[in-house]
Amino acid sequence: MTRLILFTAEAEGQVSHARLRELCDDHPRDLTLRLQDLVRRGLLVSSSEGRFTTYRATEGSEQSSEQSSQQTVPSGVATSRRRGYGSQAHQLQTIVALCQSDWRTLPELASALGRHESTVRTHYLKPLLDAGTLIRRHPDTPQHPHQAYRAAGSTP
């Protein structure tokens, strides 16, 4: 959640509580506490108080979010952090890029795309699997609890 807030603040220039509610399913109170924590840690700066407060990223937050994104997403891979943004073709390319170097689970892919797992499964993974672009770690057991995906022809 922290990375989503910092990425959104950087990408859009600011972030608000209402915008975060559009982007994720977290409880509004949890969002409030997270925003307050980021302000307290000096990663965000608030512009007012009350209902219409907006938050901007500080210099230190850019480095923090870059470091955290490098830990979870391979370098050079553009991810979409906002629901409803990016074409399906772009999302498919992102998934293939994420799966080039290593096995990726459904929760990892959903998090990187900023989408729900069910959306990633039905709209992105199924077409890529059907086309043979992705392969399953456990091909004989599609609903295996440790199922992961990798780009066909790549070597992890």
Image (cartoon, rainbow, N blue to C red):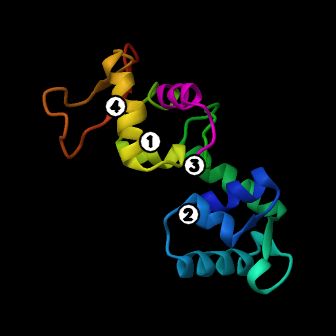
> If you read the primary sequence from the N terminus, does the residue marked by circle 3 or circle 2 appear first?
2
Asked if the residue under mark 4 is in contact with the one under mark 1, i.e. CB atoms within 8 Å, the reply is: yes
Along the polypeptide, which appears first: circle 1 or circle 2? 2
Circle 4: residue type? Tyr
Q: Of label 3 and label 1, which has the lower sequence position?
A: 3
- Give the mark nearest the N terminus, 1 or 4: 1
Residue matched to label 1: 109
Q: Secondary structure at mark 1?
A: helix
Q: Earlier in the sequence, mark 3 or mark 4?
A: 3
Q: Quadrant of residue 105?
A: top left
Q: CA distance from mark 1 to mark 2?
A: 15 Å
Residue 70 position by quadrant? top right
**Residue that appears at 27% across and 28% down:** 136
Tell me the tag on residue 149. Answer: 4
Three-letter code, disc 3 = Arg
Image quarter of the C terminus: top left
Give, as a single range, the part of the protein colored magenta: 84-96
Instruction: Name the residue carrying label 2.
Output: 1
Label 3: which secondary element: loop
Determine the secondary structure under disc 4: strand
Residue 142 within the segment the image draws in magenta: no
Residue at 18% x, 41% y is 144
Side of 41 relative to 93 (left or right) = right
Q: CA distance from mark 3 to mark 1?
A: 13 Å
Instruction: Name the residue: 55% across, 82% down.
Output: 29
- Tag shown at residue 83: 3
* Contact? badges 1 and 2 (CB < 8 Å): no
Which amino acid type is marked by label 1? Leu
Q: Is residue 26 visible?
A: yes
